[in-house]
Each structure stands twice: as structure tokens, then as C-alpha cells.
Image (spheres, rainbow, N blue to C red):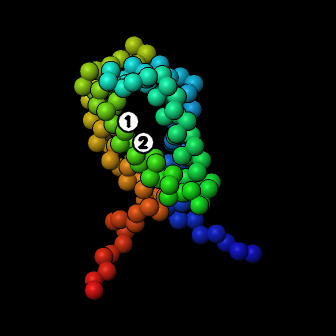
Amino acid sequence: MTHTKVTARTCLRILLGVVYLIAGVAHIRAPGGFLKITPDWVPYPSTVIFLTGLAEIVGSLALVFVPRLRVAAGIGLAAYAVCVFPANINHAINDIAIDGKHLSWWYHGPRLAFQPVFVWWALWTSGAIDWPFTTRKTT
């Protein structure tokens, strides 16, 4: 009987996959809130919201279930997190209500601060980077 070693990277990759899968489904099933926070300069916002949801779903599935696409999925999800950052900033700065609810800076502050962690999380769990858990080799 062989035992598969389950690492922190594996567990966090699965967790990130679940997070992105849920977010992707939400983008497609209930785009209204996402449309509200999308900056005015984004062309074809309904299409963009649908495509970002699709990207989250495909990226999450590839990250978790397709080892040969894992690094590409991680890079894609990291790029996605960078690309949606303007919507998060727009949501915070313009105090845009979602379903009639205004969220305080107790929500927006950590949400904005955590965005770079999402970028790193996607890159690290996919194996695209090892930082900061490796040491630099000296020659």
C-alpha cells in the first residue's frame, strides 16, 4: 500500500481551487454585484464578468485536477487577481452598495491588503514559484 504525502501546498491549492470555483460560479449565476463594482472604463462589463467567472472555474479545476496545466493555471489565476483589483478599489473608494449593503473599511481594508496574497497563493500552490520557502543558492 502506498501513501500519498499531503503537503501544505496541496491543501492550500485545493482550498484556493474551491475559493475560485465558488467565486466563478457566483460571477456567472449572480453577476449583479460584480457589475456594480466594475469600473466604468471596462468595456462590455457583462461579457467581462461572464468571462472572468469562466476563467475562475477553468483555472480552479486545472489548478486542482490537471497537473500538466497547474503552473499555467496558477499564473492565470494570479494575473486574474491583479486584473480584478481595480474593481475592488472602485468598490471601496466609491462605497458601492451591494444588495443595499454598504461595507465598511473593516471589510475593504483587509480585502485590498489580501489581494497580493491571492497572487502569491496562486503562484506558490501551483508550483510556479517556491518563494519564500527556498534558500538562494550561492555560487
Please give left or right for residue 41 compared with residue 32 in the image. left
Is 123 in front, or is 98?
123
Residue 84 marker? 1
Q: Are marks 1 and 2 in contact (CB under 8 Å)?
A: yes
Regarding mark 1 in the picture, which secondary structure is present there?
loop
The outermost residue toward the bottom is 139
Quadrant where the C terminus lies? bottom left
Is 15 in front, or is 80?
80
The outermost residue toward the top is 100
Give the labeled residue for mark 2.
Answer: 80
Q: Residue at x 71, y 74 (%)?
A: 2
Please give left or right for residue 5 compared with residue 19 in the image. right
What's under tag 1, amino acid-wise? Answer: Val
**Residue 54 percent coordinates (x, y):** 55, 36
**Res. 10 in view:** yes
Quadrant where the N terminus lies? bottom right
Please count the marks in the image.
Answer: 2
Q: Residue at x 48, y 22 (%)?
A: 46
Regarding mark 2 in the picture, which secondary structure is present there?
helix
Report crowding for label 2: few under 14, some 14 to 19, many 20 or more residues within 10 A (C-alpha).
Answer: some
**Residue 12 percent coordinates (x, y):** 49, 55
**Res. 22 in view:** no
What's under tag 2, amino acid-wise? Answer: Tyr
**Residue 136 percent coordinates (x, y):** 30, 76
Q: Residue at x 57, y 43 (%)?
A: 58
Report crowding for label 1: few under 14, some 14 to 19, many 20 or more residues within 10 A (C-alpha).
Answer: some
